[in-house]
Amino acid sequence: MKQNTFIILLCFAILSCNAQKNFSSTNNQTRLTQSNSPKLVVGIVVDQMRYDYLTRFDSKFGEGGFKRMMREGFNCKNNHFNYVPTYTGPGHASVFTGTTPKYHGVISNNWYSKTEKKVVYCAGDENVKSIGTESDAGKMSPHRMLTTSFADENKLFTQMRGKTIGIAIKDRGAILPAGHTADAAYWFYGKDEGHFITSSFYRNDLPKWVNQFNDSDTAESYFKVWDTHYDIKSYTESGSDDNNFEGGFKGKEKATFPYDLAKLKDKNGGFDILKATAYGNSLTTEFAIASVKGEALGKDSTTDILTLSYSSTDYVGHNFGVNSKEVEDTYVRLDKDLERFFEFLDTEVGVGEYTVFLTADHGATDVPGFLKEKKIPINYFNSKKFNYHIEKSLIKLFGNKYLISSNSNQQIFLNHELIKKLNISPKVVKQSIIDVIQSFPGIDNVYSSEQIFSEIDDHFIKLIRNGFNKNLSGDIVYTMMPNWVYYRKGSTHGRRFNQHTHVPLILFGDGIKRGSISRETDVIDIAPTIASVLGISSPNATTGKVIFEAIDD
């Protein structure tokens, strides 16, 4: 009996030792995995960058910027937005939350709020104060974004020890990627100040390093001549510099190189002129370098996040168009800025110690006038005539033109209170408006909110569905035919077609393989992929999938 008891106790002791050994091994492996995470993740969004800029301007790029990312990292060649509208606010939110406007709630840059009965801005927040300026330009926060970003998840995982800093020229480009828990987001306020500012949502004053940057002459130093980096005759990847398709700057008769920014600034918003030049990206890079130093990002074993949005590419694209010399030079110079930034990170954080991804918030279409000149079918959509057509029809049908509260982002918001007061069937009003819109030249399809969520298996319906939030979006959505556009000089975006949805996605650095894929990926796949590299939870409403081919296990 005693012998049996001894054997039982001996077996128990052996099992306990093995369990303790396994537990210890598991803990060590957990610590090893966490300590092997990159010290810094840099999420770069290039505003309005089409995928084909990578291939079109390839001969002008050096070896240390875009080409380094593709050579040392992983290139997703068929990366798309899987929703519409393709705008800056929704784009940044979708990249960093891993889901679409259907869930994160940033349905446009501006939209009509059904509860507030007014148009709201995606980052606007009257409940916070401006920090760094006396203007209202700092009254911003991510409060309209309804989900977490991967930066938020990294904060939660590290018990708030990992830092998050968001930087951009545009406020929304800094705020939405950084998420709700960021240490700060900084954006550029131009006019007569030329400072990077923030919001009391994050902090009550500017840190010393930001004040030092603002007090330096860095922004002022870019009031110089903007000419092409290389001989303009070598810019054969773009069209003629002198044409009728570009906006240009006030005070200069033609939109042609060179541009004397010191002479032009007074007629073009002071420091604001820098936003619409290649130098806006250089200024952003300077500030990003200062932030890594000032915040000691990537200096310990806890992963920090830097979100970096290059906004000037969008301003230049809108002003001059995708086929312009100005766009080409902006990307040539951005390539140099990226090379300089990566070399800085190599020294400051360490080669192989950081992870970077680069993508865009949307693409862009060719300038309508340019396409028309090249005999590509284009018709101009007249929004004033369109709105008048709807109002006239409503008066004829119901004797009242105010049955619509708002028409924005190609969505119709019905005035439900008035419809109820007039004792009219909402169903009848909705169908009548759909019929009226469908009869206008240039309109492709018109959908009720019920049809959007139907089982129709159509590519474009899916894009609309992913961008439609049932609590925030309108009652009716309409689309324009592919060859119908709003008249403008320069390029635009926002629609559901390939030029608007196809954007780059390159990942490189710690945890990323070398290679490429041509299968379709979505921008919402970025956040869960980075979360997988970090070994943390994906953002709480993620609908994207991990791009497993890119991860170095």
Image (cartoon, rainbow, N blue to C red):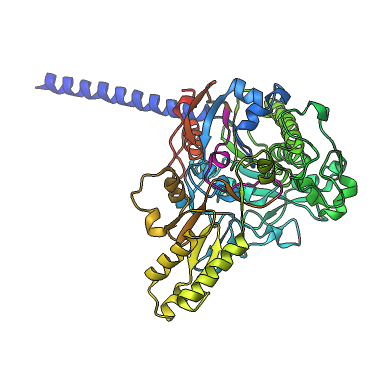
In the rendered image, the vertical position of residue 92 relative to residue 330, given as above or below: below
Asked whether 444 or 457 is in front, the reply is 444
Which portion, as a residue range, is magenta? Answer: 489-507
Residue shown at 49% from the left, 48% from the top: 148
| 492 magenta-colored | yes
In the orientation shown, which residue stands out farthest toward the left? Answer: 1
Total numbered labels placed on residues in the image: 0
Magenta stretch: helix, strand or loop mostly: loop
Residue shown at 48% from the left, 60% from the top: 439
In the rendered image, the vertical position of residue 353 relative to residue 378, given as above or below: above
The percent coordinates of residue 182 (x first, y second) are 59, 48
The percent coordinates of residue 279 (x first, y second) are 78, 40
**Which of the image's four quarters has the N terminus?**
top left
Residue shown at 46% from the left, 74% from the top: 397
| 552 magenta-colored | no
Q: Quadrant of residue 124?
A: bottom right
Asked whether 202 or 66 is in front, the reply is 66
- Let me know if residue 116 appears in the view: no
In the rendered image, the vertical position of residue 373 relative to residue 420, given as above or below: above
Residue shown at 53% from the left, 21% from the top: 515
The percent coordinates of residue 188 (x first, y second) are 73, 50
Asked whether 506 or 244 is in front, the reply is 244
373 relative to 418 in the view: left or right: right
In the rendered image, the vertical position of residue 409 relative to residue 59, given as above or below: below
536 relative to 495 in the view: left or right: left
The percent coordinates of residue 547 (x first, y second) are 46, 30
323 relative to 154 in the view: left or right: right
In the orientation shown, which residue stands out farthest toward the front? Answer: 375
- Let me know if residue 496 appears in the view: yes
In the orientation shown, which residue stands out farthest toward the right? Answer: 263
Q: Quadrant of residue 227?
A: top right
